[in-house]
Structure formats: C-alpha cells, structure tokens
Image (cartoon, rainbow, N blue to C red):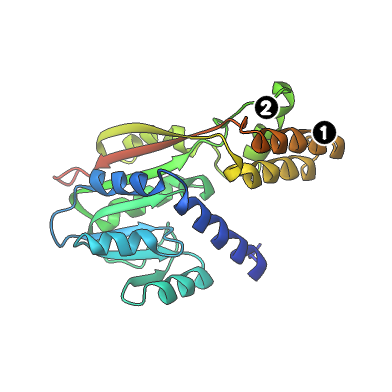
Amino acid sequence: MSKTSDDRESLIRRLDVAEALPGAAALRARTYQLLALPAGAGVVDVGCGAGRAVAELAGRGARAVGVDLGEEMIAVARHRWPEADLRVGDACDLPLEDGAVAGYRADKVFHDLAEPEKALAEAARVLVPGGRIVLAGQDWDTIVVDSDDPALTRTVVHARADQVPNPRAARRSRNLLLDAGFEEVEVEVHTGVFTDGTMLPMLTGFAAAARAGGAITAGQEAAWVAEQAERARTGRMFLALPIFLTSARLPRDPR
C-alpha cells in the first residue's frame, strides 16, 4: 500500500524530530567514524530520508550518494540540499554500479525490510572489496518505559513492535552480516534516555497503534496515555531507547 501525502509529511516531521533529539548528532557522527572512509571515497546512505546524513558525509569530504524509496522524500531532500547526489531507489536494487562505493550506511531502515538478506546482498554488490558497512537501528521489542502498569506497558510495546515488518532486525544484524559474508563484525549499543515530554508523542502513538490493532481497549489506551502525560508534566517520565550500531567489512579478496 502506498503512503499518502499526509503519511509522508508525518514521516518527515518525525524524522526531523528524531534528528534533533539530544545525542542524535553524536550518534550520526559515530556511524561516520565506523565507516572509516578514505579521503574522497564514495559512500551510499540507504534510506536517506530528507538527506541530512548525505550532506554531513559530503561535508566530511566523501562522495556521498543518498538513496530513498520515496520520490517525495527525495524531492524534499533535493530542496534542502540542492548540491547533494540524491536518487530514488530500493535497498534491494540500488541505482549504483558494482563496486561503486567504499562505504554503506543504513540508519533506521532494516526494520522496514521484509527480506534484509536481499538488501545485504545488494550492499555487498555495490561495495568495493574491503568496503565497510554500518547499520543503525532500534530493536522494537527492547524499548523500556516506566509505568505503574508494567503488564499493560509490555502489551503496548509488543503490540507496536508486531506492526513493524522486521521489529527485531537490529538484534539480528550481527548474524545477518556474518551470513552475508562480511567480516570484522562489531556491535555497539547507545541508549537514549528521555525523562521529559519530548517523546510523549511517540508513546501516545504506541498506545494508539496497540488499540487500533486490538491489543488493548480504548479505556486502557486512555489510562496509559494519561499516566505518561502526567509523568511528562512532573518530570517523571522514563523512556530508554537502545540503538544498535553494527559495523563490518566486506572481505578484501573475492570468495
């Protein structure tokens, strides 16, 4: 099912909010460090969204290419970063030649892929021998929310995770890369902790999705959202989001 314009605008707003969160810039910078790109090397940012990482990588001297499935998203990115190389394309069918880049980056992408193995085969195709890959993403089952009703909270979190195509892609990333033939696979965990109302819209969205999916009642949704709103108002919210950064290298010698 294709996204409506309202859906896309909502997604862009959410991405903008996420990129402005405390620690987000440092986390992006860490993914650039893990790519370990030689000066002037090519790199592709898959699922580039509105293009911020593409612009930042170019600012670091890389020949950065951004690829996103959404034509409207690419149009937004081109408006914001007119000098950037931005292309419409699928993670499983990238608009790049074989061995075109030394680095591959995908941030908050693989949980949306039904067949991440195909995307990694495509990553191996476009990377030069010895090229590096960095995957960043959250595990949708591993979101920590403090609540007076932990059982209901578990239901809300897991119900939302069940609506994601591949909610546990982040925890699988190490083995997915090993299965795809990558070497030197390493995993880091960076946990964002939020104690004010910044992420309240995310939590209310979780509850709405759980209710829409039939996992909780409207009354349970209202009660849970009210509790989280009161926690946000009084500075008592606690939300922890672990983000997994998985990096690896394509073998230098073809197998």
Q: Secondary structure at mark 2?
A: helix
Is residue 18 positioned above or below 232 on the image?
Answer: below
Residue depicted at x 43% and y 70%: 77
Residue depicted at x 46% and y 53%: 20
- Residue 4 makes an appearance in the image: no
Residue 55 in picture, x, y percent from top left:
32, 64
Amino acid type, callout 2 = Arg
* Displayed quadrant of residue 3: bottom right
Q: Is residue 187 left or right of residue 199?
A: left
Is residue 89 positioned above or below 107 on the image?
Answer: below
Crowd class of label 2 (few under 14; some 14 to 19; many from 20; radius 10 Å): some
Task: Name the quarter where the C terminus is drawn.
Answer: top left
Q: Secondary structure at mark 1?
A: helix
Which mark identifies residue 154? 2
Residue depicted at x 45% and y 53%: 19
Residue 154 in picture, x, y percent from top left:
67, 27
Task: Name the quarter where the N terminus is drawn.
Answer: bottom right
Residue 81 in picture, x, y percent from top left:
37, 72
Instruction: Say whether disc 1 or disc 2 marks the residue closer to the N-terminus.
Output: 2
In depth, the one of 232 and 219 nearer the eye is 232
Task: Determine which residue is flagged by label 1.
Answer: 220
Residue depicted at x 63% and y 45%: 202
Which is in the foreground here, disc 1 or disc 2? 1
Amino acid type, callout 1 = Gln
